[in-house]
Structure formats: structure tokens, C-alpha cells
Image: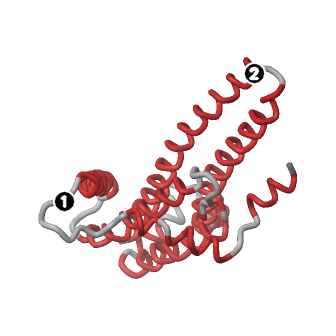
Amino acid sequence: MNEELSAFFDVPVGTMMLAIAFPAILLPTPNRLITNRWITIQQWLIQLIMKQLLSIHNAKGLSWSLMLITLTLFIGLTNLLGLLPYSFAPTTQLTVNLSMAIPLWTGTVVLGFRYKTKVSLAHLLPQGTPTFLIPMIIIIETISLLIRPVTLAVRLTANITAGHLLIHLTGTATLTLLSIHSMTITVTFVTVILLTILELAVALIQAYVFALLISLYLHESA
């Protein structure tokens, strides 16, 4: 059991690169005037996601639409990839999530100090703060700003890893109880099915939350 759990986190670099490139295969580029149903559903979902992510932005903020939709689709498809048998989700690795969160967060901070310098500095000191609390509030707000990419990466990693581990452990228990009692295996098997459905929802929701938070950070900065 311990060896199986350690193998869950120890993934070769080549396997990780293939898993990261996998989502591009599922999103073909339409090259015909009349598209099929898969392309139509794909375009409808993209428009729906973009409407939600860009509802708070002005005309200038629409320039981020391609980056946001690409980020959402990439994270969502890689999350779902981990639910396939004998597959691997790159988003279970904290290093992969940090490699996405840190550059995006750095870009929002740089844009904020370039285009909205006074507003960005004002976020470090809320209006109406008592004088004797000013140094402490500035330190707290600065720390909360610096840990944003860490919270983005840890949130995504924890949610995806926890769900996959729970399904793995429940599935292992189902195989162990196979020769003990038929009623017990029925309950555990139904539990695995329900957990899989829940993990499908979590995989899509976490991709949307990650992109939505980046969109909110861009709204504050640009």
C-alpha cells in the first residue's frame, strides 16, 4: 500500500510532459465551414466560460480572454485526465501548479504597479486604518499579496490530490473486500462511483476557480 501511494507522487519527467501535452489533442481546431457536434459543444462551452470570466472587465480587459480561456481549458482537461485508468494528472504536482501561478501573479503585480501605482499601493493600507496599526497592517497586506501564488497552487494541488487519493483508497478497499461479503463490496463500489462523479465536478470547478482568481487579480491591476 505504501509503495502504491509513493508511486502516485513519483512520476517520471517524460510521463509528465506527455500528460501536459495531452489536452491539445482533445481540442481540435475547426477547419471546415460546417462543424460537427463536438466542435459546436466546445465553442459553446468556451463562450459560456468567457462570459463568466470577463463579466467584470472593461474593453481593455478583453485582451486577456485568450489567456484566460486557455488556462481554464488546460487545467480542466489535465484534472480530468487523472480520472482515466493508468493515467496521471500534472495538476497533482505542486511544482507544475506553482509554475503556472507564479508567472501569472507576477504579471498582475507588474501591471498593477505600472498602470495603477497609487491604487496598488493603496491596497496595502485600507482607508480608515488607525495610525498605531499602520505598520502592522502594511506587513499583513504585503504578506497576503506575496502568498497569493502559493495559495493558488496549494488549493489546486490539495483538491485534486485529495480526490484522487480517496478514489484510489476506496477502490483498493473494494478489491480487498471482494472475497469477504457481497453486501460490503456493493456499498464500497457505489461509494467509488459517487466519488468519481464528485471528482468530475471538482476537477472542472477548480479549473474555473483558478482562472477566475487570476481574472480578479488582473481586474485589480489593469
Depth check: give the residue in front, 66 or 185.
185
Question: x and y percent of residue 127 in the render?
Answer: 47, 57
Q: Residue at x 42, y 74 (%)?
A: 112
Vertical side of 52 occupied by 220: above or below: below
How was the colour assigned to the protein in this rendering? secondary structure
Vertical side of 182 occupied by 172: above or below: below
Question: x and y percent of residue 118 in the render?
Answer: 41, 73
Give amino acid for label 1.
Answer: Thr
Q: Residue furthest front?
A: 179
Q: Residue at x 60, y 60 (%)?
A: 89
Q: Residue at x 46, y 77 (%)?
A: 107
- In space, the residues marked 1 and 2 are separated at their CA atoms by 48 Å
- Could you classify mark 1 by the number of other residues whose Cα lies within 10 Å: few (under 14), some (14-19), or many (20 or more)? few
Vertical side of 185 occupied by 34: above or below: below
Depth check: give the residue in front, 180 or 112.
180
Give amino acid for label 2.
Answer: Thr
In the picture, the disc for residue 35 is 1
Q: Earlier in the sequence, mark 1 or mark 2?
A: 1
- Give the residue pinned by disc 2: 184
Question: x and y percent of residue 186 in the render?
Answer: 68, 23
Q: Residue furthest left?
A: 33
Depth check: give the residue in front, 62 or 171.
171
- Secondary element at tag 2: helix
Q: Report if residue 56 is visible in the image.
A: no
- Secondary element at tag 1: loop
Vertical side of 214 occupied by 205: above or below: above
Question: x and y percent of residue 37 in the render?
Answer: 24, 51
Depth check: give the residue in front, 191 or 134.
191
For the C terminus, the image quarter is bottom left
- Could you classify mark 2 by the number of other residues whose Cα lies within 10 Å: few (under 14), some (14-19), or many (20 or more)? few
